[in-house]
Structures are given as structure tokens and as C-alpha cells.
Amino acid sequence: MTAYLAGVCSSALSFIFIVFAIGTLGYLVGGIKVKGIELGTAGVLLIALLYGVLVHFFPNFDISGKTITLFSDKIKGNFGIVSNIGTALFVTAVGLIAGPKFFRSFNKSTLAYILLGFIIIALGAGTAVLFTVLDKNMSASMAVGLLTGGLTSTPGFSAGKEVATLLDEASKAKAAADPSIIPTTFEADVTAGYGIAYTFGVLGVVLFVQLVPKILRVNMKDEISNFHAANQIAIPEPKGKLTAIEPFGFFAFFLAIMLGCLIGAVKIPVINFSLGNSGGCLIGGLLVGHFAHLGKIDCRIKKETLNFMRELGLVLFLIGAGVPGGVNFIDKFRWTYFVYGAVMTTVPMIVGYVIARYVFKLSLLNNLGSITGGMTSTPALGTLIATAGTDEVSAAYAATYPFALVSIVLASKIIIMLF
């Protein structure tokens, strides 16, 4: 009987089962409303984080001599694949949705989005540097981990790890020559800091985009009507007769992802910077969405398909990033670090909102859309779309995101190298 139970557990607790079980429970939690506020899809992240914390303490267990593994380096790699696929699906869908209007709507607001991308990241980076100076026990690599986690920036996190790994390797080489030297653990600090700050980084922005309209007591129907009126752009029909290869638009979607991966792989040698798959797929989606055809091939995709792919991508991203984030959350955890990370999320978000409203005079929905892009917050955009009832707010996200992405990657490298 115990052997049979072990076999059932081994099959039931497969990686595929765990992914979809987290999604199922996450949607149940996300659907709970408290005074009109709900986590929505971010509930999936909460369950993923809790699962990550659980398997940190119980990575495996034995039943009748059979070891059931819940988390290992291989499984961590699988979650990384899920996260990458989810990111590609989500940002590509966002780019395809925004693409038809994005390049046709360049105006003064576009400059505001670009500046906000830089300003929000600069505020976060300045806060991280301040805490590094005030807290002598915190390394710059930990500060970068907290910053990238607080801004939910995987590219920034990767850039910080890249520099930290090089410093660790140099330190190990020195320690090998001189046993009195203790090797540094900068890479581990970046990873731990990211895990500590990531939870609030996601949930904080998700709640912010829901709370602001309620605090201001805006009439969302009027706000949406004004938003549509201000953002009306004429989209020309492609010239000539086009041929649709298949009915769902998968060809165009996969083309955008393929193009995005190529764009993301291009590196600027001097600063060793690339957009990565996330930034590249966003650009790929914008381009395919803008041109809408490849020769005589129709690349227009139905809105229902894009909405589905966007939501699926968001869920996969949250599961793939959330479980390892929960595991890393425990390592080197300190309440002071958690508070630092929360401040690195809150200060850029609130100050950015104030600047967007009073300096750049952006409407509420354009303001919040730009904030989600500046905070590089994929889940918050999904929440904002649900709150606003229109996916056109993704245009502000798409306009701000690339510049915030460039800024956070550069800031991560600069902070570790200089501080």
C-alpha cells in the first residue's frame, strides 16, 4: 500500500501538476475581494511564493523508501523555462496590442513616458545607494538585489548577477593565491536580495494601481471615456489583398517572438547591454503589430487571441518567477532588508506618479500605465487592464518600459562596481 502511495505521489507531484496546481489555487485566492480590492492574477504569485518557501524547508521527502523531490537545481531550471516562456508570451501580446497605435501616436506625452522611465529608475537607484551608505552592514550587491526585486526587473537582476559573478571569480582567484583572503559572495547577495524584495515589489504595484482610483474617487466610466477620446488614432488598413495562413494568428505571434529574440540578443559592446528576450519581444510585438503584414501574409491577430496569450503569459511568468523567489526569500532574510526593498518600490512609484500628474499632466490611466512600465511590473499592467476595463493602457506601459529597462540594467552594474 505504501509503495502504491509512493507511486501516486510521485506521479501527482510531477512538475506539470505543480505548475497547474499553483495556477488553480492562485486564481481562487486572487478572486477574493476585500472592500473592492483583489489580487487578481497576482494571487498566483502569492501561492507560488508560498510554495517556494515550503519547498525551501522540505525540498524532498521519503515514502516507503522512495524519495519524492519537490525542488532541485533541475526543477529550478524548469521554473526558469516557464518564466521565460511566460514573459515572451506576455510582452509580445502587449506589443501586438499597442503596436497599431504606438508609432502613430508620438507626441508630447511620448517624451513624458521616456523621461518617466529614466526618472523612476533613478529614484529607485538613488534610494538603493542611500541605504548602502547608511547601512554599513549591507553590501552594494545586496542593495542591487533589493532594487531589482523591488522593481521586479529580471534583466536588471541578471545584469547585477553578471557583474557580481565576475567580482566573485576575481576574489576566488586572489583567495587561492592568499589563504588569508576570504572570497566574496556578491552573486549570492544579489540573488537573496532579489528574493526578499520581489514579493512586495509585485504586490505593492498591483495594489497601488487599484487603490489610487479609489482614493481619488474617480468615476472610472468617465475616465475611460476621456481616455478613449484622447487616444483615438486612425489605423490604416493594409494595402492590397492579404492572405491569412491560419485562423488564430499564431504565425504572426510566433514571428513577433522570433524577431524579438533576435532583437534582444543584439549587444552594445561598450556597455555590454542588450534588451534581452523581454525587451526584445516587446519591440518585436510593436513592429509586427504596426506593420500588420509580411508581404502578402496577413499578420493581424484577433483581440481575443491576444488577450488570451497575454493572460496565459502572465500566469506562467508569475509561477516560474514566484517559486524560485519564494526559495530565495528565506536565504539571508532580514526585516531591515525587506523594509529597504519596500521603500525602493514605494518611493519611485509614488514620486513618479506625482511627477506624471503635476509636471507632465498625464491622465490617470496614462499615468498608471506609465508607472507600471517604469516599475517594469508585468503583473501590475495585467491588474491595471482589469481595473480600467481597456487594454489600451498598455500603450503607456510599452512606451515607458524599454527606457526603464535600459536604465535598471545600467544602474545595477554601476552600483555594484562603484559602491
Image (tube, rainbow, N blue to C red):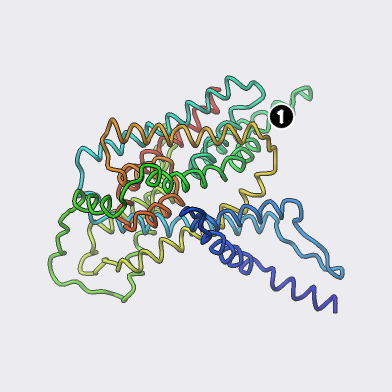
> In the image, what residue occupies the spot 65% across and 44% down?
329
For residue 325, above or below residue 115: below
Count the numbered circles shown.
1
For residue 20, above or below residue 181: below
In this image, 72 relative to 193: left or right?
A: right
Q: Position of residue 193 (x, y in %)?
A: 61, 37
In this image, 384 relative to 76: left or right?
A: left
In this image, 329 relative to 213: left or right?
A: right
What amino acid is found at the position of numbered circle 1 in the picture?
Pro
> In the image, what residue occupies the spot 13% across and 65% down?
239
For residue 354, above or below residue 303: above
Residue farthest to the left, as pictured: 240
Quadrant holding the N terminus? bottom right
Q: Position of residue 159 (x, y in %)?
A: 51, 38
Q: Position of residue 189 (x, y in %)?
A: 64, 35
| Residue marked by disc 1 | 183
Q: Position of residue 369 (x, y in %)?
A: 35, 46
In the rendered image, which quarter is residue 259 located in? Answer: bottom left
417 or 64, which is in the foreground?
64
* Residue 84 showing in the rendered view: no
Q: Residues within 10 Å of mark 1 (few under 14, many from 20)?
A: some
120 or 359, which is in the foreground?
359
> In the image, what residue occupies the spot 70% across and 37% down?
332
> In the image, what residue occupies the spot 46% across and 37% down?
409
* Residue 32 showing in the rendered view: yes
In the rendered image, which quarter is residue 248 located in? Answer: bottom left
Quadrant holding the C terminus? top right
Circle 1: element type? loop
